[in-house]
């Protein structure tokens, strides 16, 4: 094999073995990333919830835009829960996340699915549909928080 081919193969292999965790140089980066993603997701979900609760006037277009952002954000935190990211800066992540990966994965998938249902509901432009989809999504958030999120931040 010529050198170029060898180099290309080596580069491809390096990329493939670049695990998701390697996107973060240190645990602190991963913790910050997942907290940020959750914060942004919660903010945009809150805007939809405010319409459902009648705290702000219903605007179908705004609801749909926010639901779409929730879906995008819902996909992001999980890669940042790699091994060794249980500490590094204050976090509410419980050690159980790394002891029961199957259940954690299950709940993250459930949340992403419910977020997609909210987006589909928002696309109909009907507030009742949005209301119906918001409950299950909120419960999906909560069930994961109940099991895997501490009340208080670690120090
Ligand atoms: C949110 C948010 C959560 C969930 C949860 C649902 O908007 O920030 O943590 O919904 O309150 O029960």
Image: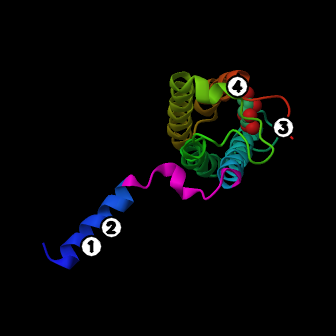
Secondary element at tag 3: loop
Question: Residue 59 location, x and y as percent?
Answer: 68, 48
Q: Give the Cα distance between marks 4 and 1.
A: 48 Å
Q: Residue placed at 61% from the left, 33% from the top?
A: 130
User: Circle 1 is placed at which residue position?
Assistant: 7
Residue at 22% x, 70% y is 6
Q: Secondary structure at mark 1?
A: helix
Q: Position of residue 36 (x, y in %)?
A: 71, 51
Mark 3 or mark 1, which is nearer to you? 1
The CA span between labels 1 and 2 is: 6 Å
Magenta residue check for 24: yes
Which tag, 3 or 2, sits closer to the chain's start?
A: 2
Please tell me how crowded label 3 is: few (under 14), some (14-19), or many (20+) other residues with Cα within 10 Å: few
Image height check: is 88 above or below 11?
above
Q: Nearer the viewer, residue 77 or 131?
A: 77
Residue for badge 4: 142
- The answer to whether residue 151 is above or below residue 124 is above
From the image, which quarter does the C terminus lie in? top right
| Distance in Å between CA atoms under marks 3 and 2 | 40 Å
- Answer yes or no: do the residues labelled 3 and 1 have beta carbons within 8 Å? no
Q: Earlier in the sequence, mark 4 or mark 3?
A: 4
Separation of residues labelled 4 and 2 (CA atoms): 42 Å
């Amino acid at each position: 094999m010529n050198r170029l081919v060898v180099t290309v193969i080596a580069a491809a292999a390096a990329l493939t073995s670049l695990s998701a965790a390697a996107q973060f140089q240190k645990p602190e980066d991963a913790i910050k990333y997942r907290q940020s993603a959750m914060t942004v997701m919660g903010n945009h979900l809150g805007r939809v919830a405010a319409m459902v609760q009648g705290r702000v006037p219903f605007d179908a277009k705004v609801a749909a835009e926010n639901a779409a952002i929730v879906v995008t954000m819902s996909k992001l935190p999980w890669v940042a829960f790699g091994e060794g990211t249980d500490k590094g800066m204050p976090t509410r992540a419980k050690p159980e996340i790394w002891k029961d990966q199957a259940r954690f994965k299950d709940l993250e998938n459930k949340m992403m699915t419910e977020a997609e249902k909210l987006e589909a509901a928002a696309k109909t432009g009907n507030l009742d549909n949005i209301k119906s989809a918001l409950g299950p999504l909120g419960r999906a958030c909560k069930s994961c928080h109940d099991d895997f999120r501490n009340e208080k931040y670690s120090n």
